[in-house]
Image: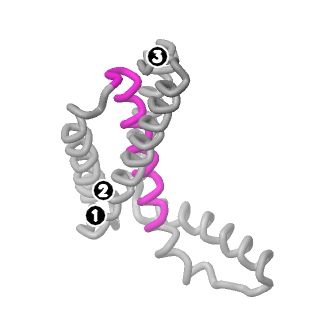
Amino acid sequence: MKKWGKFILLFLTLATLVFIFSNSLRTASVSNEQSGRITSLFSEIYRFITGKLVPPARLTHTVRKVAHFVEFALLGFLGASSAASFFGELRGRVYMLLFWGLIVALLDEYLQRFSRGRSPQVSDIFLDFTGYLSGFALACLITFLLKRRRSKHGVGVSLD
């Protein structure tokens, strides 16, 4: 991978981290308003497709939990991809990267202690880390498949 591509991946990883932490620092009312807009959008899409109305309040919990999972899956994917682009091999760094994902999930929930109307949830730590693991696993799978494809076609296997 070209040098600028490595730094773009690193930048996207850090931007995702900032996005996650900034969401945790929002007050409950701001967070609920943001979730409400997204929930209303999904409710309208569902109504358009099925013709049935689902009250947004019924979707709110699901939307919030899916958002936790997705933002951490993105972090796991970008973090592993960035590490692979810089180091080439992830084998010796898997535990460090997984530990980093767990620390971010813990910090994310801890930050909510300082946001009015919000509190940390242990279940969200597990959900966040599960999302991180999913994104991490996807990045590892893609990296493996790309290396395998390159080696079959006689192209160098280095990501540099």
For the C terminus, the quadrant is: top left
Nearer to us in this view, 56 or 88: 88
> Residue visible at 51% across and 27% down?
152
Residue kind at label 3, given as amino acid type: Gly
Residue marked by disc 3: 156
Dominant secondary structure (helix, strand or loop) of the stretch shown in magenta: helix
- Occupied quadrant, residue 10: top left
- Label 1 environment density (alpha carbons within 10 Å; few <14, some 14–19, many ≥20): some
Residue kind at label 1, given as amino acid type: Phe
Q: Which dot, 3 or 2, sits closer to the camera?
A: 3
The region drawn magenta spans: 65-88
- Label 2 environment density (alpha carbons within 10 Å; few <14, some 14–19, many ≥20): many
For marks 3 and 2 on the same chain, the one whose residue lies earlier in the sequence: 2
Helix, strand or loop under label 3: loop
Q: Is residue 3 left or right of residue 24?
A: right
Label 1 vs label 3: CA separation? 38 Å
Q: Position of residue 34 (x, y in %)?
A: 55, 61
In the picture shown, does residue 93 fall above or below 6? below
Residue marked by disc 2: 129
Q: Can you name the residue that lies furthest to the top here?
A: 3
> Residue visible at 41% across and 18% down?
158
Q: Position of residue 40 (x, y in %)?
A: 66, 71
Nearer to us in this view, 47 or 31: 47
Q: Name the disc covering residue 126, or none.
A: 1
